[in-house]
Image: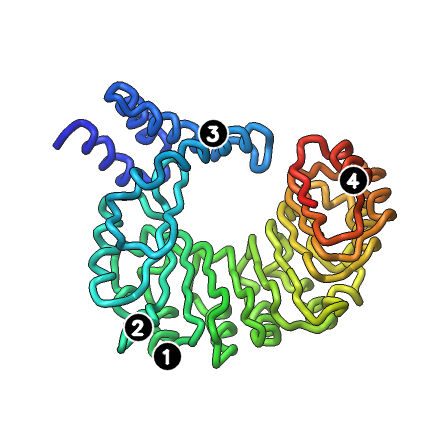
Amino acid sequence: MTDGDALRRAVIANRDDDTPRLIYADWLDENGQSDRASFIRAQVEGARAEPFSPEALEAESRADRLLVRHLKKWTRHLDGSVFEEPGFHRGFIEHVGVKLKPGSITSLGAVFDIEPLRSLTIARAFDEEEPVDFLPVLELHQLRQIHQLKIRAPEGFSHEEYTALLKSTNLHGIQKLSLQGCALHHPLWIVEMMTSNAFPELTGLDVADITNVGPSLLQAFNKASHRELKSLDASRVHFNSEQLQQLFACQCVCNLEELRLGFSGLPGQHGPLFELDIGWVLPWSHLVILDLSGQLLGDDAVRAIACQEEASSLRWLSLADNHLGADAIRFFIKSTHLNLKYLDVSGNRFNSMAIAALKERFPEALIVS
C-alpha cells in the first residue's frame, strides 16, 4: 500500500473530517498532481464558507473549472458502474447514481470502498426483462453511511418494497429522502412513514411531481410533531389554498430552511398560493432558500417578502414566471432587510433597466433574468 492509498483510506474512514482530505491534498502536490490538490482545497474552502457568499461562489468557481478539465480522469475508476454524473463534495465523490440490474449491487458495494459516499440515487433499469427490485440494495450495510437517498421509481413500489423501506435499519442515518416523480399508488404510505419511527434522522423530504400526495402529506404533517423538517420540496404537488394554509400551520415545518413550491398549471392558471397572504402563511423565520416559481403571484408577493422582516435569512429566491412588473422592482429596492445572493426573476415583465436596478440593490447576487 502506497502513502497515497493510506491517505485515501483515512479520508474514507473519516468522512466528516476535512483534515485527512487536506493532508491528502498536500501529498498530491508533492507527487505531481497539483490540479487534484487545488480542487480538494477549493471545494473544502467553498463548503466552509457562508452559503451563497462571494467567498463560497469564488471557491466553487475555481473547483468547477478544474473539474471540467479532469472529470473523465477523476471518475475513470468507477468503470461505468454509475448512470449519472458523480457528485463531488469537499474534493471527493460523495454522490453516485446506480440503476438496479444484475451485478449493479456488487458494483455499488465496491464504490463504497473507494469513495466517501454520503448520497445515493437508485433507479430501476427499464431495459431489463425482469427489473430488479429495491429489496437487495436495502440490505447493503454500507447504506448506514448515507445521509441522502434519492429513489427513482416512476412506476411505483411493491408492498414489499414499501415495508422494507420503512423497516430497514440500514437507512436510520438518512437525513434527506427524495421520492421525486415516484408513483405512489397508495399515498397513505407517506402518512405511515412520517408518523412512524422510520428514518429517525429525517430532516428533508422531496415529493416533487407526485401530484396525488397533497392530502396525505397534510395528514402526515398533522401527526408528525416528533419530526422537524429543514427542507421540503413539494413542487407541482396538487394542493388547494386551504390545504396549504393548514400544512404550514403544522409544527414539523415551522423551522424550514428550504422550501420549494414551484407550480406548473395551464397557461395563465394561478397556483394555490395566489389566494393566500404569503407574508402570514409561510414559515419565514429560518428560510434560506425559497422557490415560488410559476405561482403567478404578481407584485403583491414581492410586497409581502419586502415587508416581512423575518425574511432576512433568505439568500436564494426564485420568483420566475410570477407576472411581476414595475411595482415588484420598487418593493425590492425599498426593502432594507433582504440580503439575497441569488434571485431568479426570469419569465417576468422586466426590461434591462429593471434588471440593472436589481443588480444595484443586490450587488453580490446572481440575478437570473
The answer to whether 180 appears left or right of 267 in the picture is left
**N-terminal of the two: label 1 or label 3?**
3
**N-terminal of the two: label 3 or label 2?**
3
- Image position, residue 57 (x, y; %): 55, 33
Foreground: disc 1 or disc 3: 3
Looking at the picture, which amino acid does disc 3 mark? Arg
User: Image quadrant of residue 54?
Assistant: top right
The answer to whether 302 appears left or right of 174 in the picture is right
- Image position, residue 170 (x, y; %): 31, 60
Q: Are marks 2 and 1 in contact (CB under 8 Å)?
A: yes
Q: CA distance from mark 4 to mark 3?
A: 29 Å
Rendered view: 192 above or below 90: below
Foreground: disc 3 or disc 2: 3
Q: Which residue is mark 4?
A: 352
Q: Are marks 3 and 2 in contact (CB under 8 Å)?
A: no
Looking at the picture, which amino acid does disc 1 mark? Ser
Q: Secondary structure at mark 4?
A: helix
**N-terminal of the two: label 4 or label 2?**
2
Q: Nearer the viewer, residue 248 or 47?
A: 47
Q: Which mark is residue 133?
A: 2
Q: Which residue is mark 3?
A: 62
Alpha-carbon neighbours of circle 4 within 10 Å: few (<14), some, or many (≥20)? few
Q: Which residue is mark 1?
A: 158
- Image position, residue 304 (x, y; %): 81, 52
Q: Secondary structure at mark 2?
A: loop
